[in-house]
Amino acid sequence: MKLGNRNRTDNLQPPEKGKGVRNRTQNRPTSETNGVRTKQNGLASDQNVLYKNIKVKLLLVSEERIMKRLMTICLVVIFAANSIAATDFFASTNELGYQGTIWNITDNTGPWTTSTPRNANLFTAMNTPYMDPGYEGNYNELLSSWWEHSPSNQNDSFLQLAEEVTTPSVISASASWDETKTIFTVRVSGANAPYPWSRMWQPDNGVAWGVTFTEYSYSFEATFSQAAAIDEYGWLANTVLPDTIIGTFTGEFVVTYDIEKNPITDGDTYGFNINFSKEWFTTDGGSYGEITPASYFAVVPEPATMVLLGLGGLFLRKRR
């Protein structure tokens, strides 16, 4: 009978105790066994060291890549998203001179040009507490500096848009620093800002009676020689006076009160286009005395922006 593999295996006799495969290794000369083990241990040790070096290098490369990517993301978010923009801001300056034109829409007469550049003040605060206690709230003020000059608030070229504590006429308001933090821009638009805080020169009447600004918008851009930084109030602000300021104030108004402060129901409607510049500003206040230039432009950065700025700082420290 022909035996298969199984029968051959079954007929094999088990090795005697102590004489198996393991015993053959154990029966080798001691020097040979130690030599093999030493080589094996040395090889294993070299492999471990190599593995650890590679692991450390990979970790360092990975950390470097992560930090670089993180920094890139921070920079993209900070600078690509229109730099630092906010609806919480503060824009104030008395370094403005202005001139422009006004025309009568109802009678289709004009335009008339303001006779001479006059000084003006901008004081706009949105969702930002004022530094002096008792003056918290929103402010929307753009007006002639009549208290700094001999001309009154009823004469040639006078303008005044002023809302304090609350700003019901404001439709939109925003401000921003550019990516270099040296150019500040503020934009405000609104409608139906009434007397007694609204006045505007009517050239054909020769006076500045009470009006309602039915629609208006103003924008200003201030440039600085140094970048803005976080100040003591936690705002991104500039502590130096601006090198230049330019701006515009446009819209329409309707006359609602006469010079005696009596209401008018059929007042004319006017249009206006006023330009502003620091170049037209004068420190000569006449009887008021010398005018001290003063400006403050700031935004309140959002928490996410502050976090990204902090991560950028950590990256720079890590690189050092």
Image: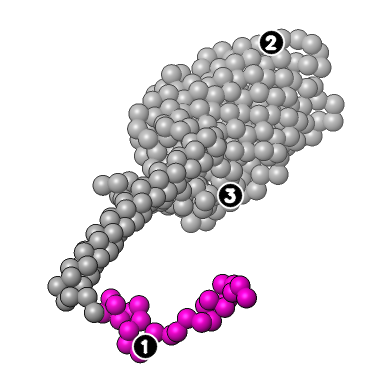
Residue that protrudes farthest toward the bottom in the picture: 17
Q: Earlier in the sequence, mark 2 or mark 3?
A: 2
- 260 vs 281, left or right, is right
Q: Is residue 194 left or right of residue 264?
A: left
Q: Is residue 125 in view from this perspective?
A: no
Q: Which residue is mark 1?
A: 16
Q: Quadrant of the N terminus?
A: bottom right
Secondary structure beneath dot 1 equals loop
Q: Is residue 267 above or below residue 16?
A: above
SS at circle 2: strand
Q: Up-down: is 110 above or below 264? A: above
Q: Position of residue 210 (x, y in %)?
A: 71, 31
Give the colouring mode of the picture: one colour
Q: How many other residues sit within 10 Å of disc 2, few (<14), some (14-19) or many (≥20)?
A: some
Name the outermost residue toward the front: 1
* Residue 254, position as x, y percentages in the image: 77, 27
Q: Please name the residue that numbered disc 3 is placed on.
A: 127
Residue 2: mark in rendering = none
The alpha-carbon separation of the residues under discs 3 and 1 comes to 95 Å
Q: Are marks 2 and 3 in contact (CB under 8 Å)?
A: no
> Image quarter for residue 216?
top right
Q: Amino acid at mark 1?
A: Glu
